[in-house]
Structure formats: C-alpha cells, structure tokens
Amino acid sequence: MPSQAKFVPIMRIYADTHQHKGMRKQLIDVLKGKGITDEDVLEAINSIPRHFFLDSAFDRIAYEDRAFPIGEGQTISQPYTVAFQTQLLQVKRFEKVLEIGTGSMYQTTVLAELGAKVFTIERQKKLYDQHKNYYFKSKYLNVKFFYGDGFKGLPTYGPFDKVLITAAAPFIPPLLIEQLRPGGMMVLPVDEGNEQRMLRITKLQDGTTTEERFHNFNFVPMLTGKS
Ligand code: SAH
C-alpha cells in the first residue's frame, strides 16, 4: 500500500520590515491629507502592521488606502474609513467599546491599541474562528471575541460607552441604543437607499438621542442572524 503523504500546514511568517514601516508612514500622510487629525488614532494606525491581517498575497499593497477581501465575501475596511470612524468615536482608555463586525480584527486592534475594553461580535463562523489565531492575543488582553448577531448586541456585558458598527446597517439598531450608557456614542454607516451615510448618535442623560450626519462611505451590508 502506498504510504499517505502527511499534511504539513504552511506556517505564515509575520515580519514587520522597514519597508512595511515606511509604507505605513506614507499611509499616515495620506490619512492626514484626507482630513484625519486625531494624533492618537494616527499613532495607533502607524503602530499596527495591517499586513498581518491580510493574506500574505497582499503583503506589498496592504498599505494602499483600499479595502481588500478577507474571505466569506467580506472585506477589511479601507484605512481612511477605520481612521474616520475611530476618530468620530473619541475612544478613551478603559472605555467599554462594542464593535459589530470583527472581520479581519484590524479595526478591533486599533480600538485595543487605544486602550479600550473591546467586545467584538462577528456573525460569520469562519471569520469568528480566526480569533483563535489572533497574532496579538497576548499583547491585547483587553479584547473579547463573540460569535453572534450584532443586531442583538451583548446585553449581559453592557452598558457600553461606545458602539461601533463596521457594516452598513439598514436602520439604527434599537437594542444597541438600549445598550449604550447615557452620554455614550454610537458610530455607524446607515444604508439610505443609494448611499451609505456615516452617522454619530449620542445618547443623552434622559435616554433620548441626537444624530450627526457625515459623508458617504462603502461598506458590506449588516445582515441578520448568524452564518
Ligand atoms: N471591522 C472589520 C470590517 C469587516 S467587514 C475589519 O476591519 O476587517 C464587516 C463585517 O461585519 C463582516 O465580517 C461581516 O460578516 C460582519 N457582519 C455583518 N453583519 C453582522 C451582524 N449582524 N453581526 C455581526 N457581524 C456582522
């Protein structure tokens, strides 16, 4: 009988070279040019190797200001989008932040680098499962990963200081407003027919909300249920 070839997984080598760091510096200039001013956000993006969150095939283009596929029909958000949403969220150290749409874990890592206690939910099992190989799991102990439907949030872990949705919501999810503490803020793109409008919702002390509207973005849709 022929002997069976053993399956040997190929190890991914993670290296953050001078070239990567140089490309990251250039990306920071691009983000500044597009109007990102929050130094903490820029510093976080400058310190996180985005190419670690992508297939190694994207190694040389990972610092272009573009979204890239991450499998399951999903994308890692464009760096400008990550920077814009994070800047709007005004994250402070030790704040509890609920993120909907873990995806590649890149945005999650930006929030963690800013010192937030991050609770992140992903509805696609295959993407969720990748957190087991999270490169930074021993660096960022302030991140908790959940498999579930982001429309429901995480009632047992709330209330949250901030909520960030990284997929285009068909409406402002009421359960997520409920899980926001008074004074808290939610940043989300909402599908308004032809366009996806970035909104920042602030919950006031009396439980009512105010809404600020920003420009349009491109996101994959926020979907109900798990997959
Ligand atoms: N923050 C991610 C963006 C990924 S794209 C990153 O930086 O890579 C948006 C993600 O939201 C996808 O992974 C998609 O599966 C997920 N998603 C869509 N609807 C969701 C829902 N209802 N609950 C949780 N995750 C959802």
Image (cartoon, rainbow, N blue to C red):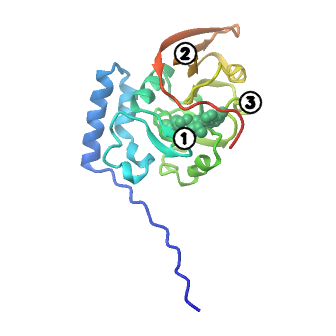
From the viewer's perspective, is the residue at label 2 or at label 3 nearer?
2
For the point 47% across and 40% down, the residue is 106
Circles 2 and 3, Cβ within 8 Å, touching? The answer is no
Image coordinates of residue 114 in percent, x first then y, are: 46, 32
Mark 2 or mark 3: whose residue is earlier in sequence: 3
Mark 1 or mark 2: whose residue is earlier in sequence: 1
Label annotation for residue 103? 1
Label annotation for residue 200? 2
Q: In screen coordinates, is 163 left or right of 80?
A: right
Q: Nearer the viewer, residue 159 or 209?
A: 209
Residue 192, above or below 167: above
SS assignment at label 1 = loop
From the viewer's perspective, is the residue at label 1 or at label 2 nearer?
1
Q: Amino acid at mark 3?
A: Pro
SS assignment at label 3 = loop
Mark 3 or mark 1: whose residue is earlier in sequence: 1
Image coordinates of residue 2 in percent, x first then y, are: 55, 89
Most extreme residue toward the right is 156
- Kindly tell me whether mark 1's CB lies below 8 Å from ligand 1: yes
